[in-house]
Image: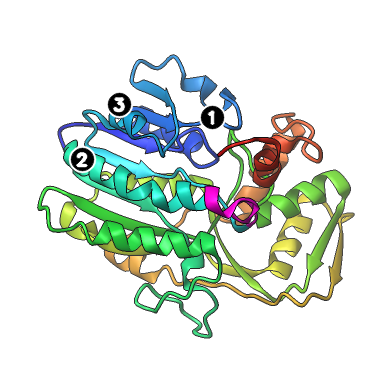
Amino acid sequence: MQNKKILVTGGAGYVGSVLVPKLLNAGYSVNVLDLYLFGKESLSKVRNNPKLNEFIGDIRDVEAIKKAVKECSSVIHLACISNDPSFELNPLLGKSINYDAFPELLNISIDSGVQRFIYASSSSVYGLKEEENVTENLSLKPLTDYSKYKALCEELLLNNNSNNNFTPLVLRPATVCGYSPRQRLDLIVNILTNHAFNNRKIQVFGGEQKRPNIHIQDMTDLYLKCLEYPKELIDSQIFNAGYENFTVNETANIIQEIIGEDVLINTVPTNDNRSYHISSEKIYNQLNFKPQYGIKNAVTDMLSAFQNNLIINPMTNNNYYNIKVMQSMNLK
């Protein structure tokens, strides 16, 4: 693509604030459309870059979308009410942002000449599967409204593949982990690392449940690569994106090994034995994409961030917890 201007919706968020600097370093011009609910600090290090344009706006605002997508060749759509608890706090709000706004965003993007649309879905769309390898051709059985609307957006996007100049792509990431300028401490690896470092104690509920993860550096590298892959490799494709499917117990043990042997792991019974696991063989076989980082890297990165005071008041600062921010705001 000759035009290297990219729209990243939610570009100031947990993943976006790592992705946007990478795009700029790769020579792209980047438009960010975000409500900046968590403040403006996450992009402060690149804010003076002349190739960055920030649009403070709501993904449900048609005029905001039109301004932000103007002259863009690609869209990376990250913006959403993220995770089940935040969505369930206000289901109508979640639906309006995660699903109702999607058709307008898609149509405006196509009408504006966008050639490549990369959608950040979720591996949670599969629900619970007995198969050891949960591949992209298995049926979807989302268990929550959050994952249900992710699946419906996938369907809407992939039904818009009749335009030869338009390339839709769906990525289904595992749970992202690691340090970001817009840190989240409500994701499994990040949660346990935070408690291990600051409380010297990890509470594990059950423990044998599998939880697929992917390092934030790998995930953002993948988005960057998806702008460069030949059209024929990604057109109307769906790819899982994850690392190994560790159990919660295995994750806790990795964290204890890195943070310190004095960290106590307390395992308690649970009635919630949901176990998620995905196969990332397709993305390796077709795109030769294999994660370069893992849980150990995520824990080490966060340990460094704690030690260097990059994460301030992690146990009490609501900004690190999506649901707490949502509870404190009157977003409608």
Extent of the magenta region? 85-93
Residue 114 is labelled as 2
Q: Dot 2 surroundings within 10 Å: few (below 14), some, or many (20 or more)?
A: many
**Residue with the most extreme left position:** 164
Residue 67 is labelled as 3
C-alpha span from label 2 to label 3: 13 Å
Q: Is residue 248 left or right of residue 180?
A: right
Task: Indicate which disc, 1 or 2, sits on the residue closer to the N terminus.
Answer: 1
Magenta-drawn stretch contains 91:
yes
**Element assignment for label 2:** loop
**Element assignment for label 1:** loop
Residue 6 is labelled as none
Q: Nearer the viewer, residue 30 or 331?
A: 331
Residue 289 visible: no
**Which amino acid type is marked by label 1?**
Tyr
The quarter in which the N terminus is drawn is: top left
